[in-house]
Image: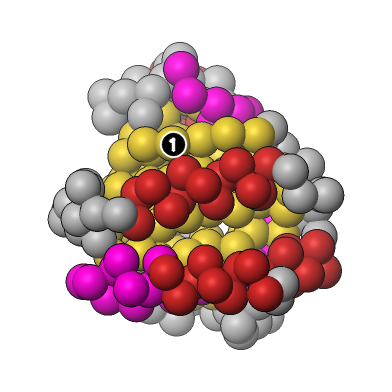
Amino acid sequence: MFLFQETYYVTPGLQPVIDSRVRSLHANHSESPQFLATDWMKYLGDATTYLAFRLWSSRDVTYSVAQREWMAEYNRSRPADAFMQPPDIEYFEQISQSGTSGDARFLACCDLRFGTNSPAMALEHDLRGELSQSPCFREYRLYRSMGGENRFFRAEFWDSQDNATSFWRSPDRRDFMARLAAASTRGAPSFRHYEVLDQLGSAAQR
């Protein structure tokens, strides 16, 4: 399972235009045989950064003639000043997933750096179980960068930001983060928070 991640830096005033365009792009992608899921989010740290997840069963994605024609028009009609800088594109492999895709309202991403055999992997396994028991928790995913084996990120999808905040502010979570930081010898974990705008498909392991 292959994740194409794209970070957009949208020109102020054009956010509604880009939001509509990306939703329509994801609907187009959903017709491909390799399509699994898409997620579309807005970063809560500023007004212009957006994040797209596009999950495929293979890197060899195929499109119908109609899809290719639609995407050609999509690219042709993009506003010249749509972005403040070119989007950042990264590729990841999905290595773990649990829960149900769709209908989330909040995403907490945690950037992680550790070796594949690190004790941090066992801590992630334990966390996944605890998250599954939490009210309003939707889905857990863990991704490994295809550009470096020591780069991972955890994606936690929630029904609300309040429930995610309550979970992570408990004393048990503070202890967990201390243990995870100690096991992450290649860099401290760091969180990013997003509003989930749209989701299609399912990221469930095949």
Residue nearer the viewer, 193 or 171: 171
Instruction: Pinpoint residue 35: horizontal percent, then vertical percent.
Output: 48, 25
Query: Which scheme is used to colour this image of the protein?
Result: secondary structure
Q: Which residue of the protein is positioned furthest toward the left in this rendering?
A: 148
Residue 172 lies in what quarter of the image? bottom right
Instruction: Assess whether residue 162 is covered by the magenta stretch.
Output: no
Residue depicted at 34% across the width and 56% down the height: 120
Instruction: Pinpoint residue 79: horizontal percent, then vertical percent.
Output: 52, 66
63 over 131 or under it: above or below: above
Question: Is residue 51 in view?
Answer: yes
Question: Is residue 42 in view?
Answer: no
Say whether residue 112 is left or right of residue 78. left
Residue 48 lies in what quarter of the image? bottom right
164 over 37 or under it: above or below: below
Say whether residue 14 is left or right of residue 181. right
Instruction: Assess whether residue 187 is covered by the magenta stretch.
Output: yes
Mark 1 crowdedness (10 Å alpha carbons): few <14, some 14-19, many ≥20: some
Pointer 1 residue: 96
Say whether residue 200 is left or right of residue 53. right
The N terminus sits in image quarter: top left
What are the residue bounds of the magenta stretch?
180-206
User: Which structural element holds mark 1?
Assistant: strand
Residue depicted at 78% across the width and 70% down the height: 166
Residue nearer the viewer, 132 or 56: 132
Residue depicted at 38% across the width and 38% down the height: 94
Residue nearer the viewer, 144 or 131: 131
Residue depicted at 72% across the width and 64% down the height: 167
Instruction: Pinpoint residue 86: horizontal percent, then vertical percent.
Output: 35, 70
Kind of residue sitting beneath label 1 = Ser
Residue nearer the viewer, 99 or 20: 99
Instruction: Pinpoint residue 165: horizontal percent, then vertical percent.
Output: 74, 71
